Image: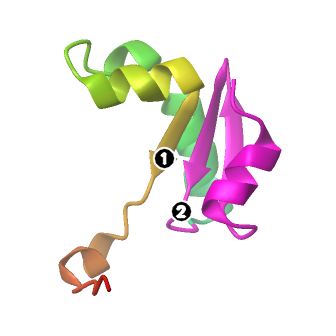
Amino acid sequence: MISKKEVRRRFGDTAVISRTGGFLLVHLDKPASELVRERTAAFKPEDYFDPDCPLCELQRAQGLVVFDDYGDNADEEILVE
């Protein structure tokens, strides 16, 4: 499993991290504590990962799941240089 230190290096010190089973859940959208608890309690690997998806297989192997549900900001334009 990926370490919390590695997660902090990849996603920054402000990323919210929770743990369930053998997975670290990284919440980039900075949700309220209650939503973090709900996501963590509801996370079921068998429902989350698509068995035919290479990206899902990589996430499963690393034990890392990233949430970035920004809700109303989903249509916000992101500029990449």
Q: Position of residue 66 (x, y in %)?
A: 48, 47
The quadrant of the picture occupied by the N terminus is top right
Quarter of the image holding residue 80? bottom left
Q: What number is the disc on residue 34? A: none
At horizontal 50% and vertical 67% (from top left) the residue drawn is 29
The quadrant of the picture occupied by the C terminus is bottom left
Tell me which label, 1 or 2, sits earlier in the chain.
2
At horizontal 74% and vertical 46% (from top left) the residue drawn is 6
- Range covered by the magenta-colored residues: 1-30
Q: What number is the disc on residue 28? A: 2
Depth check: give the residue in front, 29 or 61. Answer: 61
Q: Identify the image's colour scheme: rainbow, by chain, secondary structure or one colour.
A: rainbow
Q: Is residue 21 above or below residue 32?
A: above
Q: Which residue is mark 1?
A: 66
**Residue 50 magenta-drawn?**
no
Q: Is residue 10 above or below residue 20?
A: below
Tell me the SS state at disc 2.
loop
The amino acid type, in three-letter code, at marker 2 is Leu
**Viewed as shown, does residue 64 lie left or right of 7?**
left
Q: Position of residue 57 (x, y in %)?
A: 38, 19
Q: Residue furthest front?
A: 81
**Residue 6 magenta-drawn?**
yes
